[in-house]
């Protein structure tokens, strides 16, 4: 998984850029995790509980994206998919607008934990 963290030149806020296959993880980090110590702790605890066998899976629903942590992988998807709104209205597709449909992505648990810790360090989450 290839990614880069940058600071927005206008707002100074932390931004995350990912390769096409994982691009949804960037907005998830920015919107759902941000600089929240509590959210970071919740996700890392879920990973620990799943790896220790306490839980089989954990769903964390955010404002715009949901995260599912299982023993094998982590899956992030836009909540619009959960609501059945994943199909673009005809007026968008007919105008030739280019939407790449990258509204979900998966990665390994170890890679995801490393990503979270890198993001926390970049954004200075305590």
Image (spheres, rainbow, N blue to C red):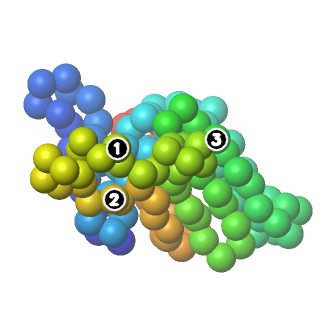
Position of residue 118 measured from the top left corner of the image (x, y, whole percent): 40, 54
Position of residue 80 measured from the top left corner of the image (x, y, whole percent): 51, 43
Residue 59 visible in the snapshot: yes
Residue mark closest to the camera, 1 vs 3: 1
Position of residue 115 measured from the top left corner of the image (x, y, whole percent): 44, 59
Position of residue 121 measured from the top left corner of the image (x, y, whole percent): 40, 45
Circle 3 sits on which residue?
61
**Marks 3 and 2, how far apart in space?**
20 Å
Q: Quadrant of the N terminus?
A: bottom left
Number of other residues with Cα within 10 Å of mark 3, as a class: few under 14, some 14 to 19, many 20 or more = some
- Residue contact between numbered discs 1 and 3, judged by CB atoms under 8 Å: no
Q: Is residue 9 left or right of residue 16?
A: left
Figure check: 62 above or below 73: above
Circle 2 sits on which residue?
101
Quarter of the image holding residue 41? top right
The first of marks 1 and 3 along the sequence is 3
Residue 114 visible in the snapshot: no
Circle 1 sits on which residue?
89
Quarter of the image holding residue 69? bottom right
């Amino acid at each position: 998984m290839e990614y880069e963290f940058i600071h927005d030149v206008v707002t100074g806020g932390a931004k995350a850029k990912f390769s096409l296959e994982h691009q949804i993880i960037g907005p998830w980090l920015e919107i759902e995790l941000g600089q929240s110590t509590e959210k970071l702790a919740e996700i890392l605890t879920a990973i620990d509980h799943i790896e220790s066998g306490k839980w089989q899976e954990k769903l964390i629903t955010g404002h715009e994206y949901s995260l599912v942590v299982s023993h094998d992988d982590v899956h992030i998807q836009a909540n619009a998919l959960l609501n059945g709104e994943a199909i673009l209205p005809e007026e968008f597709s007919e105008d030739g607008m280019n939407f790449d449909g990258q509204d979900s992505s998966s990665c390994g648990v170890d890679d995801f934990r490393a990503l979270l810790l890198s993001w926390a360090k970049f954004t200075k989450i305590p």
